[in-house]
Amino acid sequence: MYIWLTLKTKTLTIKEIAKLANVSLGTVDRVIHKRGKVSKKTEQKILDIIKKVNYTPNIYARGLALNKQYRICALLPQFSEGQYWEMPVRGMQSAATSLNQFGIQLDILYFNQNSVSSFNTMAEQLLDQEPDGVILAPVINFEAVKLSKKLKDAKIPYVLIDSYIQNSQPLSFVGQDAFQSGKLAARLLCAEINSKGAISIISIKNNENYNNTLQQRIEGFKDYIANSDFIDHISLNESHIHVSTPNVEQAITKAIGLEHHTVGVYVPSSMIHRVAGCVDQNPLEFAHLKIIGNDLIPNNIKYLEKGTISYLIGQRPENQGYYALSSFYKHLVLGQEVAQAMYLPLDIITKENLKYYDNNFQYNF
């Protein structure tokens, strides 16, 4: 017979619960964190004690007590200062600083997103390290699919960031709903142009590989217009341009489409500043052009402040990086279930509310 009134006056430790249940510490830990095999009878006995003494696990103490190191490798595109991928990296590094005391260690490998061989070389290096978890940016889609299968075979959990791989089985996906992002962009742009006129969709990319995120945004944009009651008043022109294209500014200017009397431009990537730069060089021709695109990087902010860009849709990339690494803290250290998908808010940013987004990122994990 247990003397529950005495036990309820203080917070019990796992050791004390194990003593009451007459089982090992490991058995209590497996029941609390729902992992490992424990007989139904023993599990129920432990759960009854936990309920009666109102036990709450100290997750922070547990992480420290395990005193185990977990190595997480991130495989990401190379970038220059001010480019998009700098922001997810900043978020990961912030998480790594916070989680280092719990044994989470971060190692970032970078690949040239214009080179399949670069990706494969870094992927092999990653596999050779046998990490406890992987954060993967699948910007080279087909090669990322192959790597995800190898990770699955090696029983290495991985988190996808920014872009999702169809039919994959990651621990989690962290990013935006790209299809809804495209629909939102269409709604904003159509409102700006009074739901009539020619719109140019200009996809400007750093590499020639299939990018699921960009394609989903474009499909979402088209879907919004296709299901509108003003579809007959809108025409769409679509162009795909690589940044290394000779005379790329001329190619972008042509893609905008003066001959079509274009009134709006949608850029489904962070490269909207390339279009804005061309518009600024031709102010008379493009005086009434409305432009909408993605991501709060310095080059885009400059044109948003000037009014050349009407809207930016943000996806909080710092948070993506932070949450991706934090997922492994929940999974590996705490033994907790991780959400299969963590979709970040779609921020609508204008020059009027821009100042409220400057370095204002909250990590609520």
Image (cartoon, grey):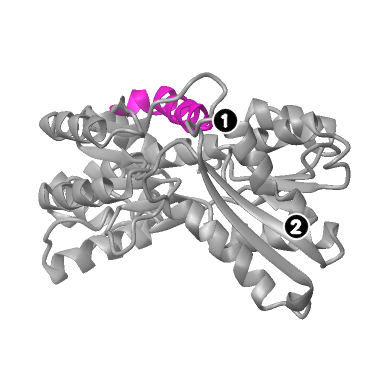
Would you identify the image quadrant in which residue 306 lies?
Answer: top right
Q: Amino acid at mark 1?
A: Asn
Vertical relation: 211 (above or below) 302: below
Question: Upstream in the sequence, badge 2 or badge 1?
Answer: 1
Vertical relation: 164 (above or below) 130: below
197 within the magenta span: no
Q: Amino acid at mark 2?
A: His
The numbered disc on residue 4 is: none
The residue nearer to you, when weighing 189 against 52, is 189
Question: Residue at label 1?
Answer: 247
Q: Main secondary structure of the magenta part?
A: helix
94 within the magenta span: yes
Residue at 32 percent of width and 58 percent of height:
50
The residue nearer to you, when weighing 194 against 171, is 194
Position of 357 compared to 8: left or right?
Answer: right
Vertical relation: 331 (above or below) 93: below
Place of residue 250 in the rendered image (x, y in percent of width and height, measured from the top left)? 64, 35
Place of residue 46 in the rendered image (x, y in percent of width and height, measured from the top left)? 23, 60
Position of 243 compared to 132: left or right?
Answer: right
Residue lying farthest top? Answer: 81
Position of 36 compared to 279: left or right?
Answer: left
The numbered disc on residue 260 is: 2
Vertical relation: 246 (above or below) 39: above
The residue nearer to you, when weighing 89 against 54, is 89
**Can see residue 355?**
no
Residue at 16 percent of width and 45 percent of height:
25
Place of residue 302 in the rendered image (x, y in percent of width and height, measured from the top left)? 74, 27
**Can see residue 281?**
yes
Span colored in magenta: 84-103
Q: What crowding class fits label 2: few (fewer than 14 Cα within 10 Å), some (14-19), or many (20 or more)? A: some
SS at badge 2:
helix
Q: What crowding class fits label 1: few (fewer than 14 Cα within 10 Å), some (14-19), or many (20 or more)? A: few
